[in-house]
Image: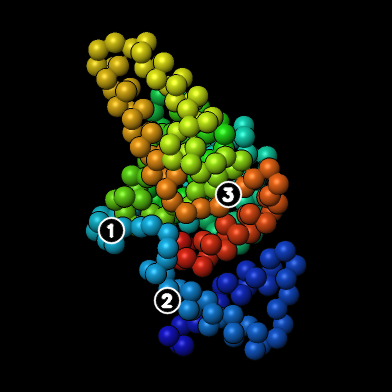
Amino acid sequence: MTQGVCTWPLKVLNNYRGIKLEDSNVLWGLNYKWLEVQEALFSSTMEVPSTAPPNRPRMTYDVFISFRGEDTRNNFVGFLYEDLRQLGIMTFMDDKKLLIGDDLSEKLVKAIEESRSSIVVLSKDYASSKWCLKELAKIMDCMSETTHRVLPVFYHVDPSHVRHQSGNFRKSFDEHEEKAQKFTGQQKEEYWKEVRNWKDSMTKIGNLAGEVVTQHSSEVDVVKKSLTRYLKHGALG
């Protein structure tokens, strides 16, 4: 593999947050370390299926970020998105304008399908948004059916509350279930089916290894840990 040494990580590191790499021995050492990371791609502890269907969509993005804007857009997610951009990682972060009507817009569905991986920022009011839950259900479907990788970030929430839909998440799902009771006939049946799918998706992502951000965490440090996990585990490969 020495003929195909990957150089873009070095360019990224050299320009990232003022880091300067001038020693040629250091550069080559990093190059070969990056190759080791690439070769270890499929030994990742992040859960992905063993095979992908032959008709997998063309990948447009490296990362799709799912989050509830009111909770995190101007802090953690803002830091994360900016750092991903600085690393040259193609990232999709949804726009409020895309959240119109009852179904996910075609653009959002396509963005998820054409992303290699997703970072899902689970904040206390994440489950109160049907848009977040619809995104999550689609993301978990992609993880089950393709090589799409998923990294949860538990932002000021207990992972067990996500897993069991307790705490703040119980309140959100109580509200969704109350809404279901207002429908009748097939509409009611379809809404209940969707709520069950949302809960199943929450359980699945709550069982994945991820990053935990507490009230006392340095959000910048957690962003760096998230990026390190993604780079090490080849989510961009």
Left or right of 28? Residue 131 is left
- Residue 106 visible, this angle: no
Q: 114 or 39: nearer the eye?
A: 39
Q: CA distance from mark 1 to mark 2?
A: 19 Å
Looking at the image, residue 69 lies above or below residue 119: above
Q: Position of residue 106 (x, y in %)?
A: 39, 36
Q: Secondary structure at mark 3?
A: strand
Q: Which residue is mark 2?
A: 39
Type of amino acid under label 1 = Ala
Q: CA distance from mark 3 to mark 2?
A: 28 Å
Q: 198 or 22: nearer the eye?
A: 198
Type of amino acid under label 3 = Val
- Figure quadrant of residue 95: top right
Few, some or many residues within 10 Å of mark 1 (<14, 14–19, 20+) = some
Q: Secondary structure at mark 1?
A: loop
Few, some or many residues within 10 Å of mark 2 (<14, 14–19, 20+) = few
Q: Which residue is mark 1?
A: 52
Q: Earlier in the sequence, mark 1 or mark 2?
A: 2
The quadrant in which the N terminus is found is bottom left
Q: CA distance from mark 3 to mark 1?
A: 29 Å
Few, some or many residues within 10 Å of mark 3 (<14, 14–19, 20+) = some
Left or right of 39? Residue 34 is right
Disc 1 and disc 2 in contact, CB within 8 angstroms: no
Looking at the image, residue 28 lies above or below residue 143: below
Q: Which residue is mark 3?
A: 212
Labelled disc at residue 9: none
Q: Secondary structure at mark 2?
A: helix
Q: Position of residue 231 (x, y in %)?
A: 53, 65
Looking at the image, residue 182 lies above or below residue 100: above
